[in-house]
Amino acid sequence: MLTLKPVMNELNPNRMPDMRLVGVVQLRVAGHLYAVPVQAVDFASDKSDTAEAEHHRGGFFVQGETMGIVVEESSDQEEFQRQIMEGCAQAVRHLSAKFLN
């Protein structure tokens, strides 16, 4: 069972770290199929806010009309998968609220 966190990450486009596309997950919500990109980010390389970088460990984000899942580049395989699963759960919750309400 997935544990949902009520927080979605709003990434600041002026401080967008370098991202590397690692894949795409497909999510089906209310009969619609969504392709959500998964991107790896090295949050530790963002020296502008060390406390914020320590706080981020991946998850779902929305920036305008763009959505995606970010994972911490330096995570091990198990943590990488956990971040993707958590991001998927957050994405499904976001899409459900947006389109089913």
Image (cartoon, rainbow, N blue to C red):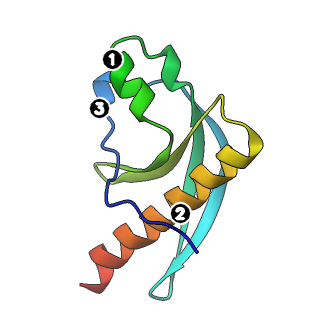
Can residue 16 be seen at all in this image of the molecule? no
Residue 30 percent coordinates (x, y):
44, 87
* Foreground pick, 53 / 94: 53
User: Mark 1: which secondary structure?
Assistant: loop
Q: Secondary structure at mark 3?
A: loop
Query: Which residue is tagged 3?
Result: 12
Q: CA distance from mark 1 to mark 2?
A: 26 Å
Q: Amino acid at mark 3?
A: Asn
Q: CA distance from mark 2 to mark 3?
A: 21 Å
Secondary structure of the residue carrying tag 2 is helix
Which quadrant of the figure has residue 65? bottom left
Q: Residue furthest bottom?
A: 31
Please name the residue shown 49% across and 66% down the image: 3
In-front residue for pair 42/77: 77
17 left or right of 35 in image: left
Which residue appears at 50% of the width and 39% of the height?
A: 57
The residue to which callout 1 is attached is 49
What type is the residue that disc 1 sits on? Asp
Q: How many marks?
A: 3
Tags 3 and 1 touching, CB below 8 Å: no
Q: Quadrant of the C terminus?
A: bottom left
The residue beneath circle 2 is 88
**Can residue 55 be seen by looking at this rendering?**
yes
Amino acid type for the residue under numbered disc 2: Cys
Where residue 2 sits in the image (x, y, percent)? 54, 69
**N-terminal label among 1 and 2:** 1
Q: Residue 77, how many percent across, how many down? A: 76, 43
